[in-house]
Amino acid sequence: MSNKIMVVDDEHEIADLIEVYLKNENYEVFKFYSPKDALMCVEDIKLDLAILDIMMPEMDGITLCQKIRDNHTFPIIMLTAKDSETDKITGLTFGADDYITKPFRPLELVARVKAQLRRYKRYNTVQPEEKESDVISHSDILLNIKTHECYLNEEPVTLTPTEFTILQILLENEGNVISAEDLFHRIWKDEYYSKSNNTITVHIRHLREKLNDSVDQPKYIKTIWGVGYKIEK
């Protein structure tokens, strides 16, 4: 069964180009030039991933992302303007998993789509048996790797695939510092990281908010300035 991907961009040429490259990879593509039409698709179709442009009339991509995140956890990749760092941070804060700047190379976008789908499918594969090693607990946090569920004080916490991966890596390396660069490569497994890339920083910030954690007095995720992040034993 092919993965179902939604593409939303009011620039017809870009949306059409993305559609061609994704169909070449045998993905089933649902293409929309209007965010409002896209919202109807989200409710009617079981999607595996969405690609959203940020600058659109009627409704911007960040608002669309936020509406999707109200009920869905599939990966979201944002298309942003080249110099709009604020849009990138805002998109990640409201639940996007990754972003790519315009103009972009279609093959790079395809590579990012594949990386997101690999993680999403791995975490949502139903397993016949649950092993003890599939569950990680730390203080008030419980993470079920097989079912992709997170609990804080026995209450469910909704995490995006990227947030879940970051938390899993930190918990599996309890007591050890993991750099932002290392986290980036473990998640995306490619080389498009740069020192100015703040993707991990934004995801960490959003993760802390969901865990009711803080930077100044962290209970879970501690920042080791100039080095990285860790969860104390």
Image (cartoon, rainbow, N blue to C red):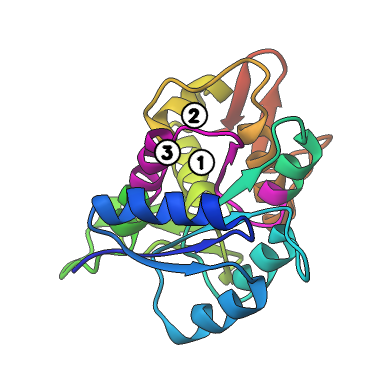
Disc 1 crowd rating (10 Å Cα; few below 14, some 14-19, many 20+) is many
Q: Is residue 96 magenta?
A: yes
Q: Amino acid at mark 2?
A: Leu
Mark closer to the chain start, 2 or 1: 1
Q: Is residue 155 visible?
A: yes
Q: What's the magenta region?
A: 91-116
Q: How crowded is the residue under tag 3: few (<14 C-alpha within 10 Å), some, or many (20+)? A: some
Q: State the separation of the CA atoms marked 2 and 1.
A: 7 Å
Q: Residue 158 sits in which quadrant?
A: bottom right
Q: State which quadrant residue 8 falls in.
A: bottom right
Instruction: Reply above or below: 129 against 39.
Output: above
Q: Which residue is mark 3?
A: 106
x, y (%) of residue 47?
41, 71
Q: Secondary structure at mark 1?
A: helix
Q: Which element carries disc 3, helix, strand or loop?
A: helix
Q: Secondary structure at mark 2?
A: helix
Amino acid type, label 3: Pro
Q: Residue at x 37, y 35 (%)?
A: 107
| Residue at image location 44% in from the left, 40% down from the top | 109
Distance, label 1 to label 3, CA atoms, is: 27 Å
Q: Label 2: which residue? A: 183
The residue that mark 1 highlights is 166
Q: Determine whether label 2 and label 1 are within 8 Å by CB.
A: yes
Horizontal and vertical percent position of residue 122: 29, 54
